[in-house]
Amino acid sequence: MIMDIGLQKKDRKVITDALSRVLADTFTLYAKTHSFHWNVTGLNFYSLHNFFKELYEDLIEGGDTIAERIRTLGYWAPSSFSEFASLSAIKEETHHIYDSADMLRQLVLDNELLVRRLKEVFDVAEANNDSVTADMITDRMNIHSKAAWMLRSHLE
C-alpha cells in the first residue's frame, strides 16, 4: 500500500537516516548510563545511583519514541548493537570507570554531543517540512540539555 502522510519517500528517507543516527546515539548513551548506574561508588553513591536510573529510563523511552517515528515514516529502525556502533557518534565505554566524577564528565559530554546531533535532525526535518519530527526532536533536545546541566552541576 502506498504511504501518503504528506512527505515524499525521498524526504522520509533523509529524515529516517538522521533519526537512525540519533537512535544509535540514544541507545549507546543508554547502555553507558545504565553501566554507570550499576557501577557507581563513593560518598554520593545513593544519589548518583538514582539519578543515573532516571537518566537511563528516559533514554529508553526516548529511544522508543524515535524508533516509532522511524517506523511511522515507513522504514525499519536499526536495532542491533553492530548497527548502533556503526551509526553512533557516542562511543561505548570499554573499560570500567571507577571514579564518579569521570562518569559525570563523560555523561555531560555525551549529552551535549547528543543535543548537537539532535539539532542536525531538527534541521533536516525542518528542511523537509516534517513538523512532527521537528517537534519530537525539540523535546529531546530540551531533555538532553537539561540532563547535561544537571550532570555538570554535580561537578561544580
Image: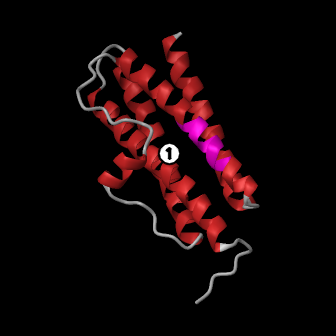
Q: Is 77 situated left or right of 139 in this image?
A: left
Give, as a three-letter code, the residue at label 1. Asp
Q: Kindly identify which residue carries mark 1.
A: 58
Depth order, front residue of 132/17: 17
Predominant SS of the magenta segment: helix
Mark 1 element type? helix
| Residue 47, position as x, y percentages in the image | 42, 24
Which of the 4 image quarters holds residue 117? Answer: top right
Residue at 49% x, 26% y is 109
Which of the 4 image quarters holds residue 153? Answer: top right
| Residue 116, position as x, y percentages in the image | 60, 36
In this orientation, does residue 40 appear?
yes
| Residue 82, position as x, y percentages in the image | 30, 52
Q: Is residue 119 magenta?
A: yes
Q: Report the magenta residues as a range.
A: 114-122
In this orientation, does residue 44 appear?
no
